[in-house]
Amino acid sequence: KAGVTQTPRYLIKTRGQQVTLSCSPISGHRSVSWYQQTPGQGLQFLFEYFSETQRNKGNFPGRFSGRQFSNSRSEMNVSTLELGDSALYLCASSLERGAKTQYFGPGTRLLVL
Amino acid sequence: DAKTTQPPSMDCAEGRAANLPCNHSTISGNEYVYWYRQIHSQGPQYIIHGLKNNETNEMASLIITEDRKSSTLILPHATLRDTAVYYCIVRGGRDDKIIFGKGTRLHILP
């Protein structure tokens, strides 16, 4: 069974631009969570989607948004990019909400110049 | 804030058992202890989880103290490929977010 896939793997943007990242969960998994990882803050929870609805949200500004499609694939969007948004963005999928195990993708490394 | 405390780094000789401690003194009755690891530049990888009994799988063993305030992840025969940051996480019900702490950076010494 294929793992979690994320596209693109690497991305370079400039301040003020917006970006959309994509995540395809493991087949059959219905819950998708997003995390941001930076050297200073470590791994931080962004949000969780289940059945096309946002179920949980971390402490990030409204510039960070996401959505989930009927096939469980998910996208996250960051508008008006700032230098501090440079990070590794990780997506994780699990069978159901609150499932004991989340499986992480390889991440999308975003660099904002 | 993370609900767990881990040492920032540890060393272990190759072939020996690596014992990684985690303190979770505020854990509540319905919260599980999870362990993940992250090898450089990859996404975190699930290792093991438990509630109150000791657990073992093909990767590791998890020992949880009787009062559940601390636990130890044991990698029985550490190899160089086990070099990673290990995260201990406490998580409760379905609405509970996974909150990662700083983790322990494990160095396996040849």
Image (tube, rainbow, N blue to C red):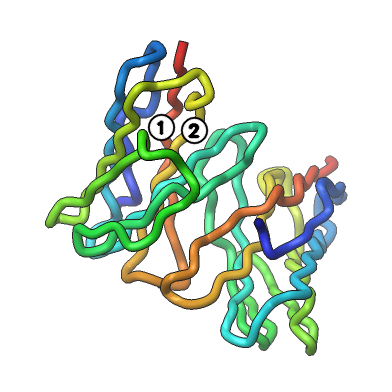
Residue A42: % across, % down: 62, 41
Residue under label 2:
A88
B25 vs A43: above or below: below
Label 2 SS:
strand
Q: Amino acid at mark 1?
A: Thr
At x 76%, y 50%, the residue is: B104
Q: Amino acid at mark 2?
A: Leu
B85 vs A37: above or below: below
Q: Would you say B2 lies left or right of B108 here?
A: left
Q: Count the marks: how many?
A: 2
Label 1 SS:
strand
Q: Would you say B94 lies left or right of B6 here?
A: left
| Residue reaching furthest to the left | A70
At x 60%, y 58%, the residue is: B36
Mark 2, other Cα within 10 Å: few <14 / some 14–19 / many ≥20: many
Tell me where residue B32 sits by quadrant: bottom right
Q: Is residue B58 visible?
A: no
Image quarter in which the C terminus of chain B is found: top right
Residue B54: % across, % down: 69, 83
- Report in which chain the residue with disc 2 lies: A
- Report in which chain the residue with disc 1 lies: A
Q: Is residue B1 visible?
A: yes
Residue B2: % across, % down: 66, 58
Mark 1, other Cα within 10 Å: few <14 / some 14–19 / many ≥20: many
Asked if disc 1 and disc 2 are in contact, CB closer than 8 Å, the reply is yes
Residue under label 1:
A108
| Residue reaching furthest to the front | A62
